Image (cartoon, rainbow, N blue to C red):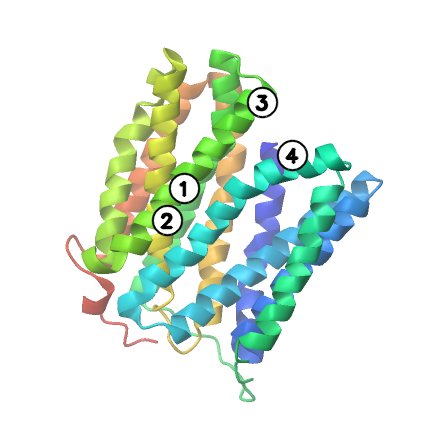
Amino acid sequence: MGTALAMRDLVEVSSPLVGRMSDRRGTTQTMVAGICGLGMATALQGASSGLILFIFALVLASVSKNSFDIGSSSWTGASVPFSNRSRAIGLIETTWALSFIIGMPVAAVLIQAGTWRTPFLVTAILCIVTGIIFHIFIPKSPRRTEILLPSRLSPTARHALLGMVALGCGHMMMLVTFAAFLEDEHGLSTSGLGFIALTIGVAELVGSGTVTLFGDRFGKIKVVKFALLLSLPLSISLPVGEASIWVALLLISLWFACTESVIVSMLSTCTELDRKARGTMMGFVYAGWALGRFFGAIVGAMVYQNYGMRPLSIIMTTVLCLALMIILKAFGISGELEDKDLSLQ
């Protein structure tokens, strides 16, 4: 599982190419292409009868979802004032969390009514319909005819990208191991793990919803620092969850709520790091996130399988501490993006 997720994230390292295309051809067009590509990928998954086609569809789904993320975040950066950016990005991320919470039971009903292929085909139809709606109702971004020169990243942007790598690494260490941890320590069944997955979805909904409501008011970087600081004792305390499934579930849920707040606030901030080439900038951001997840998936699975949760919790906490230090270096202890010099854009 860890290796499969790592390969998916390795493909997403090509995000800067998608971002550059978004700057040249328009963010709306990138969103439409991404959501329609996701529909094609899910249709292929539902129609596949062999492993090779299914893996190809997984890769296509990953690239398409990434294209949509880059397009939507770049479009939001260009269309929504920075003072309201957390609310806008938070709403987008909230819809992903809601779709997971609602989609899982709906998928179970569809499988019962049809076959395992049915949810894929229904999702494909919904994606295509959404793409058509976007194409009709969202104004098309103007294409750039001039040659886009490589954007020189400001020191703040470079540190933000390094922070995203560290955050992605720590996040994936948890993501590839928490289900195995609960199954190994508390013997959860498949249905039990499904309930846990829904619980994590609710935790992420709380995290993104909190940023939506309070991120702009309190300050985007302040939310990043505070939520990341809260995640550190949760990370190091994970082995305590061996004693009780409810303690484990509480720690893991709070951890996902905190890290979701960090991620959404960082994305909101990063949309303003390069105003002249937002697509390219967000491509680098998602590439950094994917690169971190690539290493996190491999290291997390390897450490847990060989040594258990205790060493993994120490490594995870260390990585998140590194992310916090990088973010402090980028924005200062009490600073916000508005106070930084971005003159190199």
Disc 4 from disc 1: Cα separation: 21 Å
Residue positioned 67% across, 51% down in the render: 123
> Which residue does the numbered mark 4 point to in the structure image?
108
Residue 288 spot, x, y in % from top left: 46, 53
Between 4 and 115, the residue placed more toward the observer is 115
Gap in angstroms between the C-alphas marked 4 and 3: 11 Å
Tell me if mark 3 has few (under 14), some (14-19) or many (20+) residues whose alpha carbon lies within 10 angstroms of its own: few
Q: Residue at x 24, y 64 (%)?
A: 337
Amino acid type of the residue that numbered disc 3 sits on in the rendered structure: Ser
Q: Secondary structure at mark 2?
A: helix
Task: Determine which residue is flagged by label 1.
Answer: 204
Residue contact between numbered discs 4 and 1, judged by CB atoms under 8 Å:
no
Mark 3 and mark 2 residues within 8 Å of each other at the beta carbon: no
Label 1 sits on what residue type?
Glu
Q: Residues within 10 Å of mark 2 (few under 14, many from 20)?
A: many
- Mark 1 vs 2: CB contact within 8 A: yes
Circle 3 — which element? helix
List the residue tagged with mark 3. Answer: 191
Residues at marks 2 and 4, CA–CA distance in whole angstroms: 25 Å
Res 266 quadrant in image:
bottom left
Residue 208's disc number: 2
